[in-house]
Amino acid sequence: MFDVDRRTFVALLASMVATPRLGWAEAVSGKVFFYASVGPELTLYHIDVEKTSLARQSSVMLPAMVQYAWPHPAAPVFYVASSNGGPGSTGGVGDTHHLTAFRIDRASGALTAHGVAVSLRWRPIHMSIDKAGAYALIAYNRPSGVSVHRLNPDGTIGEEVRQAVTLDTGIYAHQIRVTPDNAAVVLVTRGNDAEKDKPEDPGALKVFAFKDGQLSNRASIAPSGGYGFGPRHLDFHARLPLVYVSLERQNKLDVFKLESGTLSPAPVFSHDTLAEPGNVRPKQLAGTLHMHPSKPFLYLANRSDATSEFQGQQVDLGGENNIAVLALDPGTGAPSLIQNIDTHGFHPRTFTLDPSGEMMVVANLVPRPARDGDHVRTQPATLSCYRIGNDGKLAFARGYDIETNGKLQFWSGMVAVA
């Protein structure tokens, strides 16, 4: 789900929700839409929260594969970063990178180009918009870096803001977020595991002061020097001054205090995210995470890419592809794992919650051969839909097979439009 300002969501929902749950008509009139990408194609779905279902609508094409997207916090404008870099590309870096703005039709959710797409210097692995809707912030992974772009009053993309100082952007940036007060920015830098001929690259959370589009170095949060610390994504507690960080390379969740415009030097809580933390398969990775929009629960994707040979094919090794559900103590914010539920597909790179907090959609990245007894079957890429209970737990409702034609279902998200 897009982590736009929760006060904005509350204001939107106050006028949207007339009954406990939304059906087709209410979902459309309430202006909540779901989008998912396959390669460069970005597709709109209407949602039915009551039935926990999706209905495919229209699509738009981006200049290259969709990498990440984020809505304007107030205007019906949607920003999409695209690149031909990343998985499957030569060297992983590519040579075509853009940021594109779309206007969202308030009635249908259909997207139309809004202004001119802006070229970016490298592959944009993540992007977000500041709380005021004045700037787009881009994170690049190779080389690790950031850029800030002005947004014009009409929501079109303006010029890049040249930074006055050299920024400490760490190794392998993976996410960029503004803090709830809009006065600081956190760049999540994952680092890299050690390889046969290369030592580990340390990870860190890079904290910058943020004013008038300018970033300035404030702190580098790297427990144990960043070794054994591979952060991927973070989210902010809605009420407490806490930041929840998924550690991709350690399959853990760390929790940091957010105070005086920076983060505590060490986590105040740490928790495993796997159902079997003592049985970690190769290529097992923690992924994105999202807070429940109104209740003390956090959701985190566990992903596995490991395969083994069976009947002459590389098939799934049986790692964990699931959503971890963690309850958060109302007083302290301490997490406790209460559920791991299968995603009915392979590699849940993204997932999203609707603003009412009653429905989740998980986008599984790719089709994959899987062992089924003595046979091999192909598990398609899927969109998996779940009901969210009052206790925060998930119940699988239905899945949709997605034809990817050799591409990746790389991004998905819900958008609430004013």
Image (tube, rainbow, N blue to C red):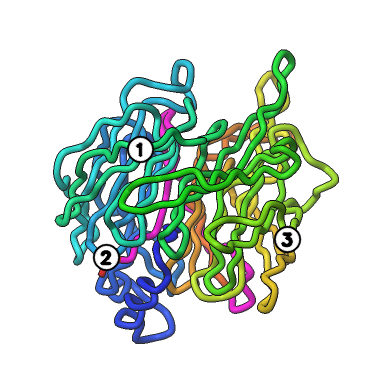
Viewer-nearest of discs 1 and 2: 1
Q: Which residues are magenta?
A: 389-416
- Return the x and y of residue 185 as percentages of the image width and height: 46, 51
User: Between 15 and 187, which is closer to the camera in this rendering?
Assistant: 187
Name the residue beneath numbered marker 3: 268
Q: Which mark is residue 74?
A: 2
Q: Residue at x 67, y 58 (%)?
A: 255
SS label for mark 1:
loop
In the rendered image, which quarter is residue 300 located in?
bottom right
Viewer-nearest of discs 2 and 3: 3
- Return the x and y of residue 245 as percentages of the image width and height: 62, 53
Q: Residue at x 29, y 74 (%)?
A: 30
User: Between 342 and 355, which is closer to the camera in this rendering?
Assistant: 355
- Return the x and y of residue 153 as percentages of the image width and height: 16, 56
* Residue 413 is covered by the magenta coloring: yes
Q: Residue at x 80, y 50 (%)?
A: 276
Q: How busy is the neighbourhood of tag 2: few (under 14 within 10 Å), some, or many (20 plus)?
A: some
Q: Which mark is residue 91?
A: none
